[in-house]
């Protein structure tokens, strides 16, 4: 028995969902640049529609990224405030994993793995490979941020033997198109409804964090740090 609120603003989409013992109700909008104005009213609307309050919840889940830097910060900040005020645990959920689950739920006959690609700007994509796993998904290749032309090496496409589905708006890059997926679907957005389902499983497994530990995952941060570290190391040889 669990009651979990899920929020996401990791892309242009803005969504909230409420998981109540296996039943999910949700609100979804394409709300580019208005996440700050829309997210809390949507939370309030959803809770009122289900006759519950924050104090009734068992946990709050959120799309922790990867995704828009601004969107991720907005969502994480709001979730921290709500969870801290109500003394609730938090469940971070991968944006890419939620997109993969949403695709499989909309395409119940699909059995091929999916390569999810989100546009990361700066001529890079956030990517990950997932497969169906009962009612959820499992990770085949960990999420990463890479230039489109290096994506094949990063996700080891050869191991998939060309049999995979490409999903997500990151597939608009010509270099990715050369990978020739069996099928591709660009109009796929992360949705709090799917995050709520993933969060329910995580909650049952005790995979929660405190409000203060609920942080976005940018992916690019670690890459930037590695580049800075290489520059510092190379400068060590300069005198």
Image (cartoon, grey):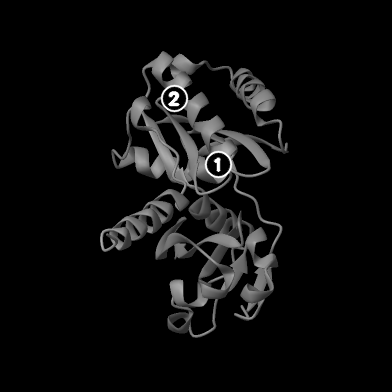
Quadrant location, the C terminus: bottom left
Write down the quadrant of residue 25 in the picture: top right
| Residue 82 x %, y % | 47, 20
- Would residue 7 be visible to someone looking at this image? yes
Give 146 or 185, whichever is nearer the viewer: 146
Label number found at residue 116: none
| Residue indicated by mark 1 | 69
Q: Residues within 10 Å of mark 1 (few under 14, many from 20)?
A: some
Q: In this view, does 1 lie above or below 136?
A: above
Q: Nearer the viewer, mark 2 or mark 1?
A: 1
| Residue 194 x %, y % | 54, 46
Quadrant location, the N terminus: top left
237 with respect to 1 (left or right): left
Q: Residue placed at 52% from the left, 15% from the top?
A: 53
| Residue indicated by mark 2 | 80
| Residue 16 x %, y % | 60, 33
Give 181 or 206, whichever is nearer the viewer: 181
26 with respect to 53 (left or right): right
Helix, strand or loop at mark 1: helix
- Would residue 155 be visible to someone looking at this image? no
Mark earlier in primary sequence (2, 1): 1
| Residue 176 x %, y % | 62, 73
Counting every numbered tag in the picture gives 2
21 with respect to 46 (left or right): left
For the residues marked 2 and 1, what is the alpha-carbon distance in whole angstroms? 16 Å
Q: How crowded is mark 2: few (under 14 residues within 10 Å), some or many (20 or more)?
A: many
Write down the quadrant of residue 207 in the picture: top left
């Amino acid at each position: 028995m669990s009651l979990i609120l899920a929020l996401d603003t990791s892309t242009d989409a803005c969504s909230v969902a409420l998981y109540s013992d296996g039943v999910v109700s949700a609100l979804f909008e394409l709300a580019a640049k208005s996440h700050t104005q829309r997210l809390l009213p949507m939370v309030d609307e959803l809770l009122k529609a289900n006759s519950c309050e924050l104090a009734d919840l068992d946990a709050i889940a959120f799309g922790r990224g990867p995704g828009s830097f601004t969107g991720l910060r907005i969502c994480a900040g709001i979730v921290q405030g709500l969870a801290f005020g109500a003394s609730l645990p938090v469940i971070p959920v991968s944006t890419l994993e939620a997109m993969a689950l949403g695709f499989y739920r909309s395409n119940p006959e699909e059995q091929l793995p999916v390569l999810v690609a989100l546009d990361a700007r700066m001529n890079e994509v956030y990517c990950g490979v997932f497969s169906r796993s009962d009612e959820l998904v499992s990770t085949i290749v960990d999420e990463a941020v890479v230039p489109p032309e290096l994506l094949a090496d990063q996700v080891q496409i050869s191991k998939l033997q060309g049999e995979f589905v490409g999903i997500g708006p990151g597939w608009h890059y010509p270099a990715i198109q050369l990978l020739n997926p069996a099928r591709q679907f660009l109009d796929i957005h992360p949705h709090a409804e799917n995050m709520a389902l993933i969060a329910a499983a995580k909650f049952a497994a005790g995979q929660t964090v405190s409000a203060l530990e609920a942080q976005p995952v940018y992916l690019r941060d670690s890459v930037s740090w590695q580049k800075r570290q290489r520059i510092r190391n190379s400068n060590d040889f300069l005198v």
